[in-house]
Image (cartoon, grey):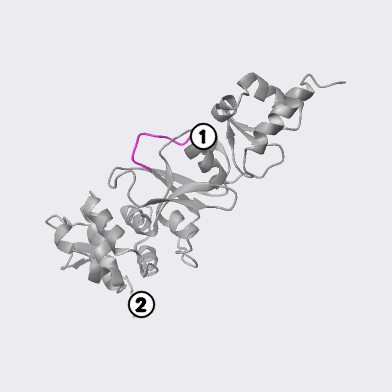
Amino acid sequence: MESTISRPRQTKINQILQKLPKSVVATSQWLNQEGLDKRSAYKYEKQSNWLESIGIGAYKRYGDAITWQGAIHAIQKQLGLDIHVGAKTALELQGKAHNISFNETNTFFFTSDKANLPKWFRDYNWQSKCTLVKSQFLGKDVGLKEFDTGNFAIIISSPERAILETLYQVPKEQDFQEAYYLTESLADIRPKLMQALLEECKSIKVKRLFLFLAQKANLPVLKKLELKKIDLGSGKRLIVKGGKLDSNYGITYPKGFQINE
């Protein structure tokens, strides 16, 4: 029995999928822009070996093993949503968090808008807990970069921005001791960008905590920061209940906190 999809249309879908990098999700919006409407996409899913649905509004190439990176590429490039990879996940991608893992695997995304991860993304099993953090404690653009995965690029936080996003989640989503180890791994962070981020940062807690941990880790960047330009607020900040008080930065830290000598 012949397929209801003609050979010319098969050529069309083949041409479209040739534009889709391996492991990347094809959203209905992108397929439509490429000339394939929802009805045609449905036919290619049900009547041929071209597409597989992974949820409403999203497909993958038949037999392809998609990744969360490929899904985020689609969310950023095809849907145009202001969502980037951040915090510890961005550090891991850049080789700044090797052998530093205290908690279950958690993939962190950030947005300063009201954007949401699509339902098809939230419902899919990415072999990792995925957390979207909505906050405007940092601006939209400073400290973001394109990261080449090999087949495609995604927008992620630079190490300088990623460590501040990590500290933003202390202590609820991020262990304090692990945050120190992550900070300690950033001996090569850029002073100019770090200065810009700290001046822009709206979270007093995050700024004080970074300076506290950077001091404990003896990061070279501390000697080049202009602290007078960084608003550290006033009063104490209770980061850890029942912890010790650091009189220099006015924050509390765990009694069992250890630093590498």
Please state if 215 lies on the left or on the right of 13 as rendered.
left
User: In the rendering, at what x and y percent does residue 222 appear?
Assistant: 25, 69
Q: Nearer the viewer, residue 200 or 208?
A: 200
- Taking the spot 55% from the left edge, 41% from the top edge, the residue there is 71
Q: Quadrant of the C terminus?
A: bottom left
Residue 124 figure quarter: top right
Three-letter residue code for mark 2: Asn
Majority secondary structure of the magenta segment? Answer: loop
Three-letter residue code for mark 1: Gln
Decide: few, some or many residues near mark 1? Use Cα within 10 Å; few <14, some 14-19, many ≥20. Answer: some
Q: Disc 1 on helix, strand or loop?
A: helix
User: In the rendering, at what x and y percent does residue 224 appear?
Assistant: 24, 68
User: In the rendering, at what x and y percent does residue 115 appear?
Assistant: 39, 34
Mark 1 touches mark 2? (CB < 8 Å): no
The residue range painted magenta reads 111-118
Any magenta on residue 121?
Answer: no
Q: Quadrant of the N terminus?
A: top right
Please state if 235 lies on the left or on the right of 188 as rendered.
left
Residue 189 figure quarter: bottom left
- Pointer 1 residue: 78
Please state if 216 lies on the left or on the right of 94 as rendered.
left
- Taking the spot 34% from the left edge, 36% from the top edge, the residue there is 113
- Pointer 2 residue: 260
Decide: few, some or many residues near mark 2? Use Cα within 10 Å; few <14, some 14-19, many ≥20. Answer: few
- Taking the spot 54% from the left edge, 34% from the top edge, the residue there is 120
Q: How many marks?
A: 2
